[in-house]
Image: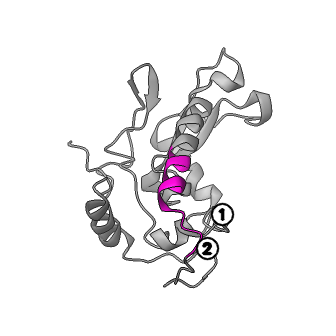
Amino acid sequence: MRPNPLGPPLATTGCKPQIHNGFSTPDPTCTPGAINPTVTLAVLKNLAFRTGCLRDCSRSATQKGTTYASYKIARPANNNGTNQICELDHVVPLEIGGADTLDNIWPQCGPKNVALAKRYFKEKDLVENYLVDIVNTQVTDHGNSPTYKSSSPETGCSYSRSRKRIARSRATSLRI
C-alpha cells in the first residue's frame, strides 16, 4: 500500500513503526497525519491560543489508546514521569494545526534503556518546539485583531465533520 499523506488511513491494523535516520516514525499507511481546519492562520496569530481545548474533542483518550493495538504494541503500565517509555504522539503537532484524531496519532515508544530526555518522543518534542517557534515567528502579528469562523472565537475549538476534505485543501494551499 502507498502512503497517503494527510489523507485517510489505508490500514488500521498491522501497523509498524519505522526507523528513519535512527528515529522511530509512524507507519504512513496507518497514520498519514491530519490537519484541524479550525486552527486557521487567525487562530495561530492569537497569542491566547492553547492546545488544551483541542485535546480529546474528536476522540477520547480511551479511543486514542486503541492505536497501541493497531501498532501491536502493549500499552505500557506506569507510563508516566521518568518511567514513561511511550507517548501517543501527533504526526502534525497540535500547536501548528494538527488534528487530535486517530489518523494523526501513533504510539511513539523507546528506546527503553536511556534517560527520559533521550527517548524518541522527547527528542521529537524538541523538533516540534522548534517548528512551533518558526510558525509563531512567521504568523504572529500583534497589530491585527483576528476574526474566527469557529464556535470558540478565542481558540478555534470547534471541529468540522468534513475535516479531511478541508485539511487536504489547506495542506495544498500551504504547500505542506
Q: Nearer the viewer, residue 110 or 127?
A: 127
Marks 1/2 in contact by CB < 8 Å: the verdict is yes
Position of residue 4 relative to residue 153, above or below, is: above
Q: Of callouts 1 and 2, which one flags the residue occurring earlier in the amino acid sequence? A: 1
Residue 161, image x and y in percent? 42, 77
- Which residue sits at x=70%, y=25%? 116
Q: Quadrant of residue 2?
A: top left
Residue 15, image x and y in percent? 39, 38
Question: Label 2 is placed on what type of residue?
Answer: Thr
| Number of the label disc, if any, that sits on residue 62 | none
Which image quadrant: the N terminus? top left
Position of residue 166 relative to residue 147, above or below, is: above
Stretch in magenta = 131-143
Q: Name the chief secondary structure element in magenta.
A: helix
Q: Quadrant of residue 172?
A: bottom left
Q: How many marks?
A: 2
Q: What residue did someone put label 1 on? A: 50
Question: Label 1 is placed on what type of residue?
Answer: Arg
